[in-house]
Each structure stands twice: as structure tokens, then as C-alpha cells.
Image (cartoon, rainbow, N blue to C red):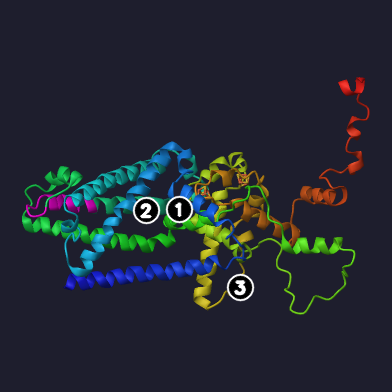
């Protein structure tokens, strides 16, 4: 009875705290500018099924892809067992599904145990790749400190959870009235010779460790890059379906141009009553970005695949698309904390551009979209970079002098060069072009 009460209190607290954090994150995401991403729902469901559920982009790097899928499938399926643990915890029962499912129960739990071993193995491999094998993408400057600790903590927590599950079953395998399953029968000799009271104690400790660990893990997720296990699903559903390089038009600029082209328009007319004040050109802070970019930030797995294919990064420039996503998330969390503290956002004198991301970083981007192509959860760092650049160019007028020259040329000549369009072929004036057409 007391155990059930303790369990119910822990469960309610764990679920309640998690729900509160999810509500806050949702509010933070919708601090961004509106953007309609509800078109072509059938294509969106397909994309989500293929990329988030089917992990289709993970396998482009087969080793990481294989072990990631192992962890993903194992973790999701094994957590079905949590349903039984929750029911047992609430009602004080023990393995409530066992009498209902009979021999099939033994097969299912045995299968979960095999998956548990797979998850353990994958976690060890990932720990090795992050800490022992010198993988460049895990050693970038933005990975020092918390991001590396976070990644290691996640793997260690998963190892603890899986070990608790297997050891719990192994203790039961030594109990004549209970018995083990596929893997736990093999592990049973670990506890050979332990008294029945000792076995019961081990089984209970592992049971509590497993469920309390899951509740703690659930509440750790929103503070960790591991939140992607949830966010990958909405993020792929709302992903850009148009080609990656397609830039969005700025409505305010489009309106200005349309006005200039309209012979009947009066450029001096006062704005209509209730007309919306023109918004900011581009983005200086997270609130200026479309909400999808903020969802992207919460979905980033910090895997570094984007940075590893970024031509700017690989040629030694300061830009790292992974850092762009991490900075956006950090700034958004800071803005969210500001709102939690003050009721509404109070200017803290900081902004995403300048305090987190520097002009040098965004100016290094070639907009090649290799990062977008590489991302396993369809994140688009380039959309953030272009919005920051738009602000820099159109509001702050802080572009490198070479860009200013190019903008002037585009404005005056319709091309980035210093020559009028009529002189486009002047370079060939004194050349003798020897072609069959000329000969004819
Ligand atoms: S689009 Fe920019 S950030 Fe992305 S890979 Fe290309 S250069 Fe790097
Ligand atoms: S943006 Fe995508 S590819 Fe880059 S680190 Fe995040 S999840 Fe990985």
C-alpha cells in the first residue's frame, strides 16, 4: 500500500513536471514569427514516417546509423514494458500481463531482453566513438563542456536503465516461483547463492531504479539534446517541402516592389487605418525568426553531420551550422527564462546576432545547403543564417565592403559585376571566334 502511494506520487510529479516543461518549450517556439506549414499534409505524414520513424537519413553513415537504430528501436519497444511497470506500481501487482499472455509473455520479455543487450552494446560503442576514437565532429569547439557531458550522461543513463532491467530479471530467474527469460536465464548465475530475501531486495531495487530512472530521464530530456527523440517527429512533419535552396520572399519587400511597379499607386499615401507597422527586415534575435527555426533548434541532436560537410567549416572558417542551432536554442532558453521570471520579455540588452552568433560566422556561409542535405532530422540552419544576414544587410547596413559593391552593381546593372548588361559580351569583341556557325 505504502509502495503504491509512493509510486503514484512519484509518477504524478514526474509526469506533471515534464508536462510543465513541454508547455514552456511550446510557448518558446511560438515566440517566433508566424509561418504556415500545414500544406500538403499527405506528403508531410510520409516525410515524418520515412525520416523520423524510419530513420532513413541515419543510414547514410552506416556504423552510426546501425547503432542508432538499435538504440532507437530497443528504447521504444522496451518502454512498452514500462506500461506494465506503471500498472504494477499503481495497483501493487507483479507482472500483471504474465497470466494474461501466458507463454507469449515469456517470448516478448525475452525479445525485450535481447534488445536491451543491443542497446547496452550500442551505448558502449557510442561512448567509445565520442571519448576514445578521435572523431573530429565530436571535438569541435562548440562541443566542449556541457554538450559533451550531456551526450555522455545520456548514454550512461541508458546503460544504467538497461542494466537495471536485466539485473531485475536475472534476480527473478533465481526465484523458483518466478523464473527468468532468454537473457536473464543466462545472467542468473551472477546471483547464484544469494538468499531469497537478498534476491527479493535486488529485484525491488532494480525495479525502482528502472522506473525512477525513466521518470528522471523524462524530465532531463527537455534540458538535453536528447529531446530530439520527441521533437524529431513534429520537426520532420513541418519540414520545408520545397527544394532546399528556395528562399522565402520577404513580404514587406514584395509589397514595396509591387507598389513601385503599380502606375496607379500613390507612394505618398498615408497608411490605411489599422495597417500593420512594417516588421523587422530579417532577424536580430530569436523572436524575429520563423517559429519553425525555433522548433529546429529544439530538435537538433548535435550530431555534427552538418558541420562535417560544411565547406566553410572544413576550410577553417569560423562557421559551424551545428553551433548556429545550438546558439539559437541557448538564446531561446534564455529568452524563455526571462519571460518566466518577469511575466513578459524584459529587454536584457542581448541578441542572437552579436552575443551568440557573430557576423564573421554568418558571412562565411556559401548557402550551398550541404548542411540541410546532411541533417538526419531535416533541420535547416541556412534559414537562420539568411535571416540574420538580411537583418545585417537591410537594417544594420553592416556588410563587408565587397558585398556593398556587389549590391550596388545588382541594383544598377542587374548583375554583380561593374558593367552594364549591354556590355555583357564585350569581352569577346576582339576575339576571332572560330565556330561552324561563323564559317557558314
Ligand atoms: S549552407 Fe552554409 S552552413 Fe550550410 S553547409 Fe553550406 S556553407 Fe555551411
Ligand atoms: S543541425 Fe542536424 S546535422 Fe546538424 S547537428 Fe543538428 S541534427 Fe545534426
Q: Is mark 3 within 8 Å of ligand 2?
A: no
Mark drawn on residue 154: 2
Identify the secondary structure beneath mark 3.
Answer: loop
x%, y% of residue 22?
A: 44, 67
Whether the residue under disc 1 has CB within 8 Å of ligand 2? no
Which percent across, then down, holds residue 341? Answer: 50, 76
Of circles 3 and 2, which is in front? 2
Using the image, determine if residue 134 lies above or below residue 77: above
For the N terminus, which image quadrant?
Answer: bottom left
Residue occupied by mark 1: 147
- Number of marks present in the image shown: 3
Going 86% across and 60% down the picture, which residue do you hit? 261
Position of 69 relative to 393 (above/below): above
Position of residue 227 in the picture relative to residue 294 (left or right): left
Residue 276 appears in view: yes
Residue count near mark 3 (Cα–Cα under 10 Å), binned few <14, some 14–19, many ≥20: few
Between the residue at mark 3 and the residue at mark 1, the CA separation in whole angstroms equals 27 Å
Q: Which residue in the protein does label 3 denote?
A: 347
In primary-sequence order, the first of circles 3 and 1 is 1
Prevailing SS of the magenta stretch? helix
Instruction: In the displayed orientation, state which residue is furthest to the front.
Output: 42
Report if residue 326 is visible in the image.
no
Instruction: Say left or right for 214 vs 208.
Output: right
Segment colored magenta: 165-178
Question: Dots 3 and 1: beta carbons under 8 Å?
Answer: no
Amino acid at each position: 500500500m505504502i509502495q503504491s502511494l509512493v509510486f503514484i506520487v512519484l509518477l504524478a510529479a514526474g509526469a506533471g513536471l515534464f508536462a510543465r516543461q513541454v508547455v514552456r518549450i511550446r510557448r518558446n517556439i511560438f515566440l517566433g514569427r508566424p509561418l504556415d506549414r500545414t500544406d500538403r499534409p499527405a506528403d508531410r505524414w510520409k516525410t515524418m514516417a520515412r525520416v523520423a520513424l524510419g530513420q532513413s537519413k541515419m543510414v547514410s553513415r552506416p556504423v552510426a546509423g546501425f547503432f542508432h537504430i538499435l538504440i532507437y528501436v530497443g528504447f521504444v519497444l522496451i518502454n512498452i514494458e514500462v506500461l506494465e511497470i506503471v500498472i504494477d506500481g499503481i495497483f501493487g501487482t507483479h507482472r500483471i500481463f504474465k497470466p494474461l499472455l501466458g507463454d507469449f509473455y515469456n517470448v516478448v520479455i525475452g525479445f525485450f531482453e535481447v534488445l536491451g543487450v543491443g542497446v547496452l552494446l550500442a551505448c558502449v560503442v557510442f561512448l567509445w566513438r565520442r571519448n576514445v576514437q578521435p572523431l573530429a565532429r565530436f571535438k569541435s569547439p562548440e562541443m566542449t563542456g556541457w554538450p559533451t557531458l550531456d551526450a555522455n550522461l545520456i548514454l550512461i543513463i541508458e546503460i544504467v536503465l538497461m542494466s537495471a532491467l536485466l539485473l531485475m530479471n536475472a534476480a527473478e530467474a533465481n526465484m523458483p516461483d518466478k523464473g527468468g527469460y532468454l537473457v536473464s536465464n543466462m545472467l542468473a548465475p551472477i546471483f547464484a547463492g544469494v538468499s531469497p530475501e537478498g534476491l527479493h531486495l535486488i529485484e525491488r531495487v532494480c525495479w525502482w531504479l528502472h522506473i525512477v530512472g525513466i521518470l528522471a530521464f523524462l524530465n532531463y530530456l527537455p534540458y538535453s539534446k536528447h529531446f530530439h527523440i520527441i521533437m524529431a517527429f513534429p520537426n520532420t512533419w513541418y519540414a520545408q517541402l520545397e527544394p532546399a535552396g528556395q528562399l522565402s520572399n520577404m513580404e514587406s519587400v514584395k509589397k514595396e516592389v509591387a507598389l513601385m511597379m503599380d502606375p496607379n499607386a500613390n507612394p505618398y499615401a498615408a497608411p490605411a487605418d489599422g495597417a500593420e507597422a512594417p516588421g523587422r527586415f530579417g532577424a536580430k534575435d530569436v523572436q524575429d525568426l520563423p517559429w519553425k527555426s525555433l522548433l529546429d533548434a529544439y530538435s537538433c541532436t548535435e550530431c555534427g553531420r552538418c558541420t562535417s560537410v560544411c565547406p566553410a567549416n572544413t576550410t577553417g572558417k569560423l562557421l559551424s551550422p551545428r553551433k548556429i542551432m545550438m546558439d539559437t536554442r541557448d538564446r531561446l532558453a534564455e529568452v524563455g527564462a526571462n519571460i518566466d521570471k518577469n511575466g513578459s520579455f524584459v529587454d536584457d540588452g542581448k541578441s542572437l546576432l552579436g552575443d551568440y552568433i557573430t557576423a564573421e560566422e554568418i558571412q562565411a556561409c556559401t548557402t550551398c545547403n550541404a548542411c540541410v542535405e546532411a541533417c538526419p532530422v531535416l533541420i535547416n540552419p541556412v534559414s537562420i543564417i539568411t535571416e540574420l544576414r538580411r537583418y545585417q544587410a537591410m537594417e544594420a547596413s553592416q556588410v563587408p565592403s565587397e558585398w556593398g559593391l556587389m549590391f550596388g552593381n545588382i541594383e544598377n546593372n542587374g548583375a554583380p559585376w561593374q558593367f552594364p548588361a549591354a556590355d555583357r559580351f564585350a569581352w569577346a569583341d576582339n576575339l576571332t571566334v572560330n565556330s561552324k556557325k561563323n564559317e557558314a
